[in-house]
Every structure is written in structure tokens, then in C-alpha cells.
Image (cartoon, helix red, strand yellow):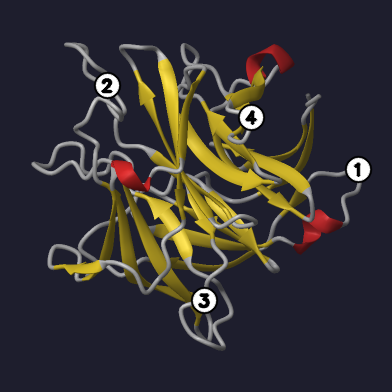
Amino acid sequence: MRLTHRANMAFGAQDGAFYGDYMFRFNADGACRVFDARPLDNPGTEVIDLPLIAQFRTDPADPVTPHFNAVVFGNEYYAPGDAFPLLYANLYNNYAGAEDRMEGTCCVYRLQKTDDSFSTTLVQVIRVGFVKDTLWKSAGDKADVRPYGNFVIDTEQNLLHAFTMRDAEHMTRYFTFRLPKLAEGECDPRFGVPTVTLQKEDILDWFDTEYHLYIQGACCHGGKIYSSEGFNKNIPPALRVIEPAAKKQLCHTDLTTLGYEIEAEWIDFRNGICYYSDAKGQIYEADFEID
């Protein structure tokens, strides 16, 4: 793998996504910073600072706030004329201490541009309905540290991939579902929006891969899942590529072997180029070596 430091953005955060001229970078409390992504399209020899365009926050009246360590735009639009398709974000461990930890939960938003900023509206919730089953969680007495799950969308095939780390078996398990349409789901009074609960009979496919560590961001490109991970010097930053169709891992790079030790937090593609950001907001172009 070859990494090239292309840009910096003010403030680190969780995952985010490119769309059009924008880079959206979210934090675990619902705050989002929006940057102008166009300077990345004409890279020079100098590292640039991406211009900050706006800052906004998801509606504080929303019943839930995602952790935003998996953020992806879909294909479907909430209404004709909308500038952005639906935005998907995983809850992850934001409710780890609650009675209902809401494991395997993904929020769907309508994103709109206002006169000088942006706003979101929660329009749907997608939940995995078998998180208590050993198909999702580890069997035996050893509890999973991170059973909350991540989500990523294959917009080319309209698929939803959900995956979770299984500590007892020391593996990561991936599930593939058809991506629910916005019109689907029953209204759940806890969320106030239509909620789709994915059951075992909805699984199109599933498989196990090598164990991941603290997945921090994910995206799908060309039918492959790209993820960033890591947490500290004991859990080193890494980038990983999984191919669901082949049910295998194609690439795993421990970034410390390349001299990079800062937590990897965000990953996405723009114009066919993969970028990842570390926790300090440094953006790198990542060239993977995949056979």
C-alpha cells in the first residue's frame, strides 16, 4: 500500500462521506462539519487545507443520535428535487449503557441545504432483529465487547451489509440484506418514524472473516467493503478490504508498518480515489495492492 498525504481538515471526528462538492464529517454527538472537497481533485506537491463551508448538528429533538462511525449516502431520494440522497449512519455504542443498547441499529436521514448551512431529518430506522441470537453474537460465556454492529451500503447493487465483531470466536461476521426502501417499515413510537426490522429470513448471505479491531469507518466501492480501524498503540490503525461476493478478505494493512500511528477514523471514495483520514484530520490518498 502507498499513502500520500493530500490535505488537512480542521478538527478530527468520526466517519463521513463525500457527495458532490462536499465532504461531510460527523462526530459521535451529531455535530457535522462540511468541507469543500474540490481541492482534492487537483493535487499538487503541497498538502492543502480543505475549506470549511458550514457546521450543523442533527436535530436535538431526535429520539436517537448515531455514533457516526459508518456514514454512507444511498441512491434513493426522500423527495423529488432534493439535492442529496438518503444518508445512513450507524448508532454503534452510543447507547451501550441503556436498557435497550439498540445493537444493530442504523438511522436514515433526509439531508437538506439551507441558505447558509445544512439540516437533517430522521426519516427511517433500520434494525437487526436477531442481535440476541448466536448468529449475531458470540456463543458461550465470553461477551462481545463491540456487539453493536456497523453498516455499509453497496449503492451499485442496492445491498445493505451489516457486520459485527465476535470476540469469543475472534472473527468478524458479515450479513448481506436487500437495502430497504424508504416506504417500508412500521412506525415505532420510540423513534417516531417507520422502522424496518431485518430478521434471519431476510439474510441474503453471510460469512466470517478475519477479526477486525475497533472499526472506525466504512464504505463500499466496486462491490468491495473498505474499512478503517484502530484505537491506540495497542490496537494499531489499519485499513482493510473485504469482498462479500467472494466471502473473503482481500487486503489488510497495519499502518504502523508504514510509519503511521494515529487512529484511522474515516474512509471514502471520490472520483475513483480512496481517501482515509486519521483522528487529527489528516487526509491521505490510499493506493491498495489488491490482486
For marks 4 and 1, the one nearer the N-term is 1
Quarter placement of the C terminus: top right
Q: What whole-number distance in Å separates the C-alpha atoms at marks 3 and 1?
A: 38 Å
Looking at the image, can residue 104 be seen?
A: no
For marks 4 and 3, the one nearer the N-term is 3
Mark 4 residue type: Ala
Q: Is residue 279 left or right of residue 39?
A: left
- Read off the residue under disc 2: 144
- Read off the residue under disc 1: 45
For marks 2 and 4, the one nearer the N-term is 2
In this figure, what is the number of numbered marks? 4
Q: What whole-number distance in Å separates the C-alpha atoms at marks 4 and 3?
A: 30 Å
Quarter placement of the N terminus: top right
Q: What whole-number distance in Å separates the C-alpha atoms at marks 4 and 1?
A: 38 Å
152 relative to 5, above or below:
below
244 relative to 14, above or below:
above
* Identity of the residue furthest to the left in this view: 99
- Read off the residue under disc 3: 77
Mark 3 packing: few (<14 Cα in 10 Å), some, or many (20+)? Answer: some
Say which element carries label 2: loop
Mark 1 residue type: Thr
* Cβ–Cβ under 8 Å for marks 4 and 3: no
Residue drawn at (43%, 75%), measured in percent from left and top?
119
Residue drawn at (13%, 44%), measured in percent from left and top?
100
Q: Nearer the viewer, residue 211 or 34?
A: 211
For marks 2 and 3, the one nearer the N-term is 3
- Read off the residue under disc 4: 246
Q: What whole-number distance in Å separates the C-alpha atoms at marks 2 and 3?
A: 36 Å
Residue depth check, mark 2 versus mark 1: number of the one nearer the observer? 2
Q: What whole-number distance in Å separates the C-alpha atoms at marks 2 and 4?
A: 26 Å
Looking at the image, can residue 284 be seen?
A: yes
